[in-house]
Amino acid sequence: MNPSTIDHPTIVPPEKWLAARREFLREEKEFSRQRDRLAAHRRGLPWVKVGQAYVFASPHGAVSLAELFEGRGQLIVYHFMLAPGWEEGCRGCSFVSDHFDGALPHLGARDVAFTAVAIAALDEIERFKARMGWKFNWVSSHGTSFNRDFRVSFTPEEVEAGEADYNFGRHWIGADEMPGLSVFARGADGAVYHTYSTYSRGLDLLIGTYNLLDLVPKGRNEDAEAPMKWVCHHDRYPHVPVAG
């Protein structure tokens, strides 16, 4: 099959295309309303005070969780899969992270700070970050319990067992590191509170490329058993000549 063609599309006259598109618009609008309701419910979830005094290694020295807010009231932390000794970061996490830099000024304008956190040593993080050309803040949790406490790092025993507490239940895990995202807020009392975490498919919302692929006829066109098998680090894709 020619990769630029689609097998067996339904071809109709313009008036039938418009009728089908208008019908589908009703579904899209209902989805938007459901998404708004879900977002409101998420914002209304209870908070829990962070009792641990986490300290991370950054290019500017040791920083606390509170200092990662950089004076703002809200903080998003992406739990990046990069462990000590790895030659490079996780392909999936790198795919997600390719979307962060453009959002930073917009997040800052809405009182939101952003950082990635990995358990690898800072020099390993800095080396991979330079290779990828990323600008977002990225700190090391090496030597702390942060990754374990937020259920993104696992013991050899858990990996051998094949399942662990992940994504708010007992789930299969395939490695000693898994991806996730956590949100924190500064309370009126000045304390740091954990307001939300998400894992697994909950991270799809971060991937603008997926939103674009969902608009085209082939969609994501992924292997059901290994959905992100096609994803490469952005400097590892084979060269694709531009048509015309």
Image: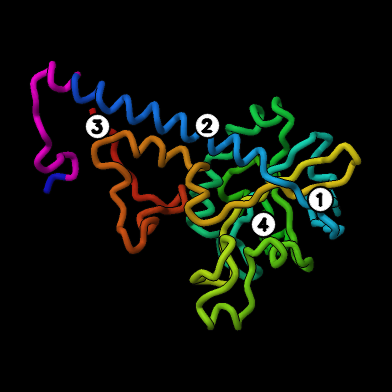
Q: CA distance from mark 1 to mark 2?
A: 30 Å
Q: Which residues are magenta?
A: 3-18
Q: Position of residue 170 (x, y in %)?
A: 54, 70
Q: Nearer the viewer, mark 1 or mark 2?
A: 2
Please, what is the three-letter code of the amino acid marked with disc 1? Leu
In the image, what residue occupies the spot 19% across and 19% down? 18
Identify the colour scheme used. Answer: rainbow
Q: CA distance from mark 3 to mark 1?
A: 48 Å
Q: CA distance from mark 2 to mark 3?
A: 39 Å
Which of the labelled discs sits on residue 65, or is there none?
1
Q: Examine the structure image and report whether residue 93 is included in the region drawn in magenta.
A: no
Which of the labelled discs sits on residue 36, or is there none?
2
Q: Nearer the viewer, mark 4 or mark 3?
A: 4
Q: Nearer the viewer, residue 139 or 179?
A: 179
Q: Examine the structure image and report whether residue 9 is included in the region drawn in magenta.
A: yes
In the image, what residue occupies the spot 85% across and 51% down? 64
Please, what is the three-letter code of the amino acid marked with disc 3? Ala
Q: Which residue is mark 3?
A: 243
Q: Nearer the viewer, mark 4 or mark 1?
A: 1
The mark total stands at 4
Q: CA distance from mark 4 to mark 3?
A: 37 Å
Q: Which residue is mark 4?
A: 125
* For marks 1 and 2 on the same chain, the one whose residue lies earlier in the sequence: 2
Which residue ends up furthest to the top in the rendered image? Answer: 15
In the image, what residue occupies the spot 51% across and 69% down? 171
Secondary structure under the numbered disc 3 in the rendered image: loop
